[in-house]
Amino acid sequence: MLMAGIVAAAALAALVTAAYISPEASAAVVGVLILIAAIGWPYVLGVPARKSQSAVIALSALAASATAYVAPDGSALAWLPVALALGLGAVFLIQLIRGTGQSHRLESTLGASAGLFMIALGAGWIAAEGLAVNEGSSGVTLVTGISVLMAIATAMLPWPDRIVGPLGVVLAALAGPLAALIFTDVEGLAAGIIGAVCGAVVMAARRLLITRDAPLNVAAILSVGVAPILALGSLVYFLDRLLLS
């Protein structure tokens, strides 16, 4: 859990830093994180056909990110469902090609589909930079990053899940308005809602990770740390549009 938390914090820091540099930097960072998460995801699942599944996840997520980068404002994620649909079709096709009687077909299909969905949602980080609330300052991204970082730090505590889960959500919700008050002019209520929702996602990822019995190799640790951060992207984008645009 400790190493995955460090990886998640590093991925988050890279996204927030890139947001202050340029949209191109954000797109590049998201692309690198997608590759890291896609390569390691089959190792998280412990299933065969790893190269083909990694390729499908990476290509679909990169396609979603590319369309988010070039799409006009207001429709940045319009092609995300298309990329997801094509990726899911490819996941099923891989299992058909493997043939009947092969091991872990159901686990591969469900696990790869879930990974594809999580990783492709990273396109939202690119889309969020095109919103008016982030134009020039990327203040919402900073506030969101601080909230998520608080949730990650809480998730690394070696306490029971019944304590860490609610605590992480509450601290993330409180960190958002505080960061907004100190660093930006983002509305406190909106920052609190965004922080609470992001904190809940991080706590859910923690719960999934601690229930695993099998150890993870380096590729899997990198993937399991990066994937939840990518998954927050589209969630942050839609919350920004709903609450602040």
Image: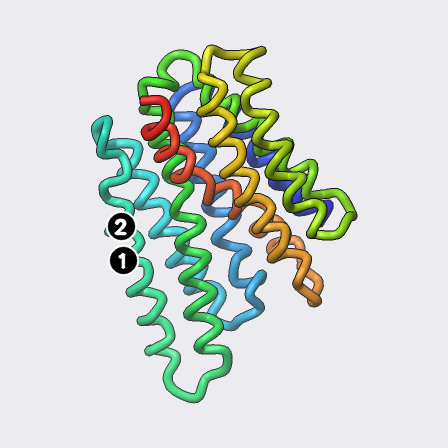
- The answer to which quarter of the image holds residue 85 is bottom left
Give the tally of numbered discs: 2
Tell me the residue at 36%/15% (across/down): 135
Q: What numbered label is drawn on residue 81? A: 2
Residue 108 image offset from top left, x and y in percent: 46, 71
Query: On screen, 84 above or below 191?
Result: below
Residue 123 image offset from top left, x and y in percent: 37, 39
Amino acid type assigned to the residue bearing label 2 in the image: Pro
**Callout 2 secondary element:** helix
Quick check: marks 2 and 1 in contact, CB under 8 Å? Answer: yes
Amino acid type assigned to the residue bearing label 1 in the image: Ala
Is residue 179 among the parts visible in the rendering? yes
- The answer to which quarter of the image holds residue 239 is top left
The quarter of the rendered structure image containing the C terminus is top left
Q: What numbered label is drawn on residue 191? A: none
Residue 203 image offset from top left, x and y in percent: 60, 46
Tell me the residue at 33%/70% (across/down): 92
Judge left or right: residue 213 versus residue 46: right
- Neighbor class of circle 2 (other Cα within 10 Å; few <14, some 14-19, many 20+) is some
Q: CA distance from mark 2 to mark 1?
A: 6 Å
Q: Which residue is mark 1?
A: 85
Tell me the residue at 45%/16% (across/down): 186
- The answer to which quarter of the image holds residue 96 is bottom left
Judge left or right: residue 197 versus residue 88: right
- Neighbor class of circle 1 (other Cα within 10 Å; few <14, some 14-19, many 20+) is some
